[in-house]
Image: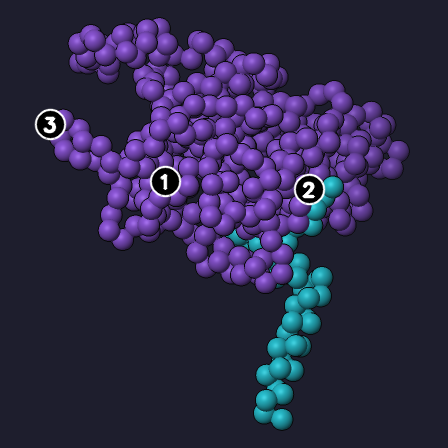
Amino acid sequence: MKLRTPVVVTAAVVAVASLPQVRRGLARLLLRTTGTVVRDQRRIR
Amino acid sequence: MTIEREAAQPPVWQNDTPEGQAPVREGQDWSSWPTYDSAVLGLRDYWYPVGWAEQFGRKPQTVRLLGEDIALVREGDEIYALHDRCPHRGVPLSLGRRQFPDTVSCPYHGWTFELKTGNLCAVLTDGPDSPICGKLKVRTYPVAQRLGLVWIYVGAGPVPPVERDIPDELLEHDFVMGGRSDIRNGNWRFAAENGFDEGHAKYLHNTALWRLFKVMPAWNKTRIQQEGPWLVRVQEELHWEAEYPGLGVWTNKRWWKRMPLPDRPGKGSRVNPVIDSLNIPGFVSIRLPGLLRVAYPQFIHYEWYVPVDEDHVRYVQIMARFERGLTAAAFKLKYLAGIRWLFHGQFTGQDAWMVDVSDAPPERLYRPDVSITTWRRLVERSKPVVQTRPLRAKDES
């Protein structure tokens, strides 16, 4: 039980952070607080 | 007059004296580059990055580009750009309200413009039958979103695809990137010249924390090579230290610094395959309308020098690593923890300092400035359309 808790919490955090709306919100927060953007870019052509 | 011929003559006092100004000699002004000399406000007919897409929301915001004031407004996923001036009384539309979808209304009398076309579609203080509706419009600008950046095209005639002004490698590969966009003091030409300047890195940046553990050469000889749209600085001779008669030894070597860096990205022991495939013959390259590329074996740093007005430049910096997965995630952390502060902060902050205090012409160039003169020649050869009469929100004449 004790071992499973951090795994479950981590998985939940990763799942929530993967939602597009959450990702966009985090990106905006990062930009506003640090003036910085980090992002993955898929090939355009 | 060549440098060698001049060397045989006694030194000439170059600066102003209490008796008067020193004469500007041939080659010390920018008359050899008339187009470049006149391009104080930048070059038209190019796409320029003006900020990150996340910066722009439903509330209108203003940016200045090539001296033109532009209001940017988001509607859903689209961002629209209009000249930031209501034709009625000259009030900035960026102060306006979003009264109806797909429109922006001037905050003064409610003149309402379509975002897409700039057409005046309603005047809220003159009733639905206002006779002025449909009779005028504000100028709109083509907008694109690529690489997380908002790009605006300033020019006339057919609009080229934004991809024309983005390096191919950033279009044809997956990558991870970190970046910053800041407005800095100084004219865009000084920023571009500083970026491609051969001589300064070894001296100005030898105190930068980014280079704390890496040796830089003491001096070198360079030639400039054109590769497609890029001018590339190619090292011909590299010297790590030199004895100056009567003065002593000059070197950037220190016991704690690693050396040497390879003199071109493809010569590194571990080169990213994408960067290797570019076959760039030198570390640093520049192209129109003012984009610098510094290619390291594992990543590439890009700098756009976007003209804001006569005395300001938007410095858009991107560091791209052509990786995915865990390596990409590690790069993001590294960027936030270090690169953002050390390279995109302090290191290029030293450049910003020099761009801010540069004051030329008149100027007296020296051998490594072949990088600067070749860049100016490229601009001249390209016969660009120079920005002359920008659309300002307020007439400042």
Chain letter behind tag 3: B
Q: Residues within 10 Å of mark 3 (few under 14, many from 20)?
A: few
Tell which residue pokes out farthest to the right in this image: B129
Tell which residue pokes out farthest to the bottom in this image: A1
- Image location of residue A18, percent across then percent down: 68, 66
User: Any mark on residue B172, and which?
Assistant: 2
Residue for point 65% across, 71% down: A14
Alpha carbon separation for disc pair 3 and 2: 54 Å
Q: Quadrant of residue B141?
A: top right
Residue nearer the viewer, B322 or B57: B322
For label 1, the residue is B350
- B384 left or right of B21? right
Secondary element at image label 1: helix
For label 3, the residue is B246
Q: Are marks 1 and 3 in contact (CB under 8 Å)?
A: no
> Looking at the image, is mark 1 or mark 2 earlier in the sequence?
2
> Looking at the image, is mark 3 or mark 2 earlier in the sequence?
2
Residue type at tag 1:
Gln
